[in-house]
Image (cartoon, rainbow, N blue to C red):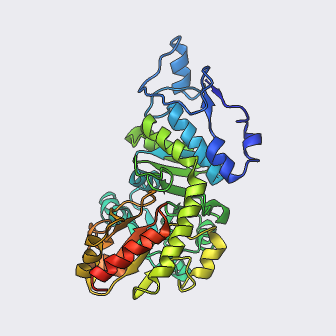
Amino acid sequence: MKRATGQNRSITEKWRPATRAVRAGTWRSEQGETSEAIYVTSGYSYEDAATPAARFAGEQTGMTYSRTQNPSVQMLEERIAMMEGAQACRVQASGMAAMTASMLCQLSAGDHMVIARAAFGPTRWVTDNLLPRFGIETTAVDGRDLDAWKAAIRPNTKVFFFETPANPTMDIVDIAGVCALAKERGIVSVVDNAFATSALQRPMEFGADVVAYAATKLMDGQGRVLAGAVCGSADFINNVLLPFQRNTGPTLSPFSAWVVLKGLETLDLRAHRQAENAMKVARFLETRVPRILHPGLESHPQHDLVKKQMIAAGSVFSFEVDGGRARAHAVLDALELIDISNNIGDAKTLMTHPSTTTHSSLTPQVREDMGVREGMLRISVGLEDPDDVIDDLDQALRKAGH
């Protein structure tokens, strides 16, 4: 098995992002396949006893066990790292496996972390419920307020964690400002970039130490598999994350890795087209609903910051309807084209009620503090004709009496 032609790092680093998404990290067997192979194997055989001994001791490169390495998985890791501008990447069994691993691999009892309060529901469940069981304290702050980050720092603060844009409130965090503060205090900054991906936002260019992903979303792009990824320096990935991952086992399957590899080939095209479609849908909704949260709209309070750190505002946004949960559910029930689903990043347009789905594990008070209200709906705009999506939203709002 060999690297595909041109896979010398000095050459691939010259490639632009869209090229890296198609070509980076490709290996080829002696068959010369153009589409990456799926290596469905749990283990590997060796020609002599000295070889596995050398590999397990870290003295020789090569495969040992698919919980640690697999050719299909490693191709995906190399490609994501190149796209992100990171030294290294490890992929995980799901997006939440990636978020959890990025925290637990570097936190111990007695440590403290700061998280932006607007976050994916399960992420907040981990920080609010799981970490305290192991003696790890968390402070949730308004991620938009740099002074709040500064005020939350303690002598034992080890990690800053935030999403931008945040799910589902679309809060935007000043990546450069927060990461600079973290570096100044010796704190590791972790950014969940799932809503944008490297096609629309590259946090490491603004100082982020670690970037985590639910590759289930835009990277796959068609709602087929669960996958996650963590990118960072070679030292962080190999010496901090890998021991945790190798011994706890949130391993991505070769098939899922291959599916995401295929998804990455069209990521740049999909991310930009879906962002364009979402903007058109948002401009329609701006005239029809009392409140809309789309970072690309001039009405978004952080629109200027969006222009500084994002190439485009993405395909996901939220809006609110009057009448609380009953009216929000009525809108969902009236949809004819758009699917009711808690997923995002699919080629199909999806919509959900966060309060009763993605954030249902949180208390009403936490949801209120985050800004996840009962009348809020989150939409992930797909690749359909945006006018058809608009027509469906219009008729659903009218049927729901809005």
Q: Residue at x 25, y 79 (%)?
A: 325
Using the rendered view, name the quadrant where residue 398 is placed: bottom left
- Give residue 380's position: percent from left, percent from top: 43, 66
Asked whether, in this view, residue 393 is left or right of residue 26, the answer is left
Q: Residue at x 41, y 63 (%)?
A: 349
Residue found at the far left of this picture = 326
Asked whether, in this view, residue 187 is left or right of residue 366, the answer is right
Identify which residue, 381 or 179, lies in the foreground.
Answer: 381
Image: 396 above or below 54: below
Q: Residue at x 60, y 21 (%)?
A: 31
- Give residue 14's position: percent from left, percent from top: 77, 47
Image: 133 above or below 175: above
Asked whether, in this view, residue 115 is left or right of residue 187, the answer is left
Q: Could you tell me how many numbered marks the image carries?
A: 0
Image: 95 above or below 309: above
Q: Quadrant of the N terminus?
A: top right
Asked whether, in this view, residue 146 is left or right of residue 5, the answer is left
The answer to whether residue 88 shows anywhere in this view is no
Identify which residue, 315 or 397, lies in the foreground.
Answer: 397
Q: Quadrant of the C terminus?
A: bottom left
- Give residue 331's position: percent from left, percent from top: 29, 76
The answer to whether residue 382 shows anywhere in this view is yes
Identify which residue, 47 or 328, lies in the foreground.
Answer: 328
Image: 298 above or below 116: below
Q: Residue at x 31, y 70 (%)?
A: 335
- Give residue 207's position: percent from left, percent from top: 64, 64
Residue found at the far top of this picture = 48
